[in-house]
Image: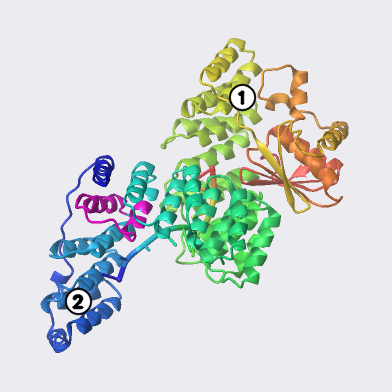
Amino acid sequence: MLRNLRGKFLRFSSNTTTKLRFSTSSAAAYTVSDDLHEQSSESSQASVSRDTGDYISAILSCKNVIDVGKIHAQVIVNGFLQELPVANKLLYLYAQFRAIADAETLFDEMSVKDSVSWSVMVGGFAKTGDFFNCLRVFREIVRSSLSLDNYTLPIVIRACREKRDSVVGGLIHELVLKSGMDLDSYVCAALVAMYAKCGMIDDACKLFDQLPKRDLVTWTVMIGAYADSGRPDESWVLFEKMRNEGIVPDRAAIVTIVNACAKLGALHKATIVHDYIRLMNFPVGVILGTALIDMHAKCGNVDAAREVFDSMKERNVISWSAMIAAYGYHGEARKALELFQMMMLERRLSPNEITFVSLLNSCSHAGFVEEGLEMFDLMAKYGIRPNVKHYTCMIDLLGRAGRLDEASEMIETLPVEKDETLWGSFLGACRIHKNVEMAERAAMSLLELQPENSGHYILLSNIYANDGKWEEVAKVRNLMNQRGLKKVPGYTWIEANNRTHRFKVGDRTHPKSKEIYESLRDLTDKLEKAGYVPDTNFVLHDVDEEVKVGMLSLHSEKLALAFGLIATPEGSLLRITKNLRVCGDCHSFFKFASLVTRREVVVRDANRFHCFKEGSCSCGDYW
DNA sequence: CTAGGGTTAG
């Protein structure tokens, strides 16, 4: 049975066979100097076990590959390469210093190898990011009927995770199950992480639930898995559960939950987590610090983000980029640009492609067209070639500013492959500036790229409807029905009294539903008197104008706002989160609402914040 | 002697 499974694994997992690469060993590059030789012969008088230990500690004290090579030479001269612990330790250190070629040479020369030797080789390839060869060596282990061990398995499972190869990963899982080994927590953690990263959250969850014992790492992996799968609320539940079981988080676990809170976007939870970190006196290093910056920023508190940034003793490019992005989300392009200038003054730090995405995004959110163009040109000076994300920012920047022709020309001459986000940005701009032809083209491209996304069909049919092309409308609708697609709901959350409430279009599930609708009707009346005009261009359905107005008033953003108005005390800030981009009509609705109700409203959508105050938005008209 | 989980964009 197991033999069959091994065969199956080998058939499925090997797509190519590569030959081993040979290279000169570092040991060969050294001659043994007299004093080393003397020292070695001296110690050869002693017992074997002591010498073995001596060599191991000598190897451990190596600071670089050259040191390892020197000891390697001694080991050869004194005939200690037969001692597996010694040879394995040499292998391990070559691998640690990423001298994988040296490790391979030594491995091939070793006449006796044990499971540790093999495991170290597998780990060595993984360390250098060569997951292909990592799995290749593992296949040799499987083929040679050596027994699987709990040291090698986590590494190869991680390799599958990195390669997003759930097929091979699943086969390894099967091998583990059928081999009758005890479920090891290292192996399980790796499997859960692998399934999660491959988007198979249900498999990850199932495995996690089956585990007889869960340690800190398995919990952490599962918490992160939920956050990665767009279910950060469940990350939070799991984190509390873990603590209730008496498990104390370490720094990696804390970073994971901070990350989940960033995705949650709930200010209240962000505060709790940060207070907890202070209470537990967790050292805030670069990684945790950066995660905190990101969390505070995404939960709407840029000042707290900046405070963390300023308090950090050490910062890397990621920390700077996170802080620049933080200002970008909040429409503070000036501060983002200032921060970038400050970063340039720090020698030894150079911006990476993400720094520029953050910068360009800041510019596009605030409508800083010229500055954005300048930054885009600056990329070349740092040897960074724009990728599709940079171009998306530029299309967004030009498009929102109404420079559709320039945006369109950029799309035509794009040296990179266009993705759905890029077309989505362009389409958004076309809708803002009501350019039907260009919108049609963008929607068609979206439909080609993602034929399974129902939103694109609705969008395209609406564009045709606006243009009176009813035959085309029917065609698109039919196509959508043929493919059995249904609409995905857009949700809106609002924080009130330390709780988060969720709404979807036309929601009536909330216990205060009746009051919410009354309040909304009231509010709409007031806003219309103040000058708000419903923009039915944003109703994605082919219905009468009157019906469209009715549909607009069912938008989840508005329900959330109406609820916030009745559930929170006057004068307090309203925090709203939307999982899709807020439409133009709601944007204008919020502007008027902030004027009429004298309430400040902060809306987060697609990682952008819109602060509505006294009838205007922090990002001007660049929503 | 060898092993699992953690930071920035979209």
Q: Tell whether position A318 is magenta.
A: no
**Same chain? Circles 1 and 2:** yes
Q: Nearer the viewer, residue A583 or A378?
A: A583
Residue A566: x and y in percent read: 85, 44
Q: Is residue A366 above or below residue A93?
A: above
Q: Nearer the viewer, residue A563 or A437?
A: A563
Residue labelled with disc 2: A70
What is the quadrant of the C terminus of chain A in the image? top right
* Relative side of A73 to A517, left or right: left
Q: Tell whether position A148 is magenta.
A: yes
Magenta: main secondary structure equals helix
Q: Nearer the viewer, residue A331 or A3?
A: A3
Q: Is residue A53 above or below residue A284?
A: below
The picture quadrant where one finds residue A167 is: top left
Residue labelled with disc 1: A435
What residue type is disc 2 on? Lys
Secondary structure of the residue carrying tag 1 is loop
Q: Is residue A478 above or below residue A349?
A: above
Q: Which colour scheme appears in the figure?
A: rainbow
Q: Residue at x 31, y 51 (%)?
A: A179
Q: Neighbour class for label 1 at 10 Å: few (<14), some, many (≥20)?
A: some
What is the quadrant of the N terminus of chain A in the image? top left
Residue A302: x and y in percent read: 67, 57
Q: Residue at x 53, y 66 (%)?
A: A251
Q: Nearer the viewer, residue A269 or A320?
A: A269
Q: Residue at x 65, y 31 (%)?
A: A432
* Relative side of A236 to A148, left or right: right
* Span of residues in magenta: A130-158
Q: Earlier in the sequence, mark 1 or mark 2?
A: 2
